[in-house]
Amino acid sequence: MLLYLQRVVQKLRKPPPVYQTQNEGSDHNPRFRSTVSVDGVSYTSSSTFQLRKVAELDVSRIAYTAITQKEKTKALQFIQQV
């Protein structure tokens, strides 16, 4: 999913996504939550995960879904105006 987000952002000619991941657990039981910023908009995963990579995959899925839905809505509005 990271790659899909990267591709859609590149296709829209936006700056690359910036990920921030924090450990909200302890050293012996880490729980990671990720945030990704795309073109000034931040998306944060609602859950925590035991692996940093899984947290980043989750937030990239959230961002990808939101961005593609927004672009579809914009395209439909454009078509309706024509």
Image (cartoon, rainbow, N blue to C red):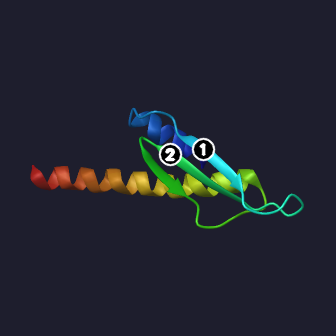
Q: Say which of 17 and 23 sits in front.
A: 23
Task: Label 2, secondary structure: give it.
Answer: strand
Kindly identify the residue that appears in the image at 50 percent across and 38 percent down. Answer: 7
Kindly identify the residue that appears in the image at 42 percent across and 43 percent down. Answer: 40
Q: Residues within 10 Å of mark 2 (few under 14, many from 20)?
A: some
Residue at mark 1: 19
- In the rendered structure, the answer to whether residue 57 lies left or right of residue 23 reads left
- In the rendered structure, the answer to whether residue 28 lies left or right of residue 31 reads right
Q: Say which of 72 and 60 sits in front.
A: 60
Q: Say which of 80 and 17 sits in front.
A: 17
The three-letter code of the residue at mark 1 reads: Tyr
Answer with the quarter of the image where residue 47 lies.
bottom right
57 lies above or below 3: below
Residue 42 lies, in percent from the top left, at 48, 51
Kindly identify the residue that appears in the image at 38 percent across and 57 percent down. Answer: 69
C-alpha span from label 2 to label 1: 7 Å
Residue at mark 2: 37
Answer with the quarter of the image where residue 34 lies.
bottom right
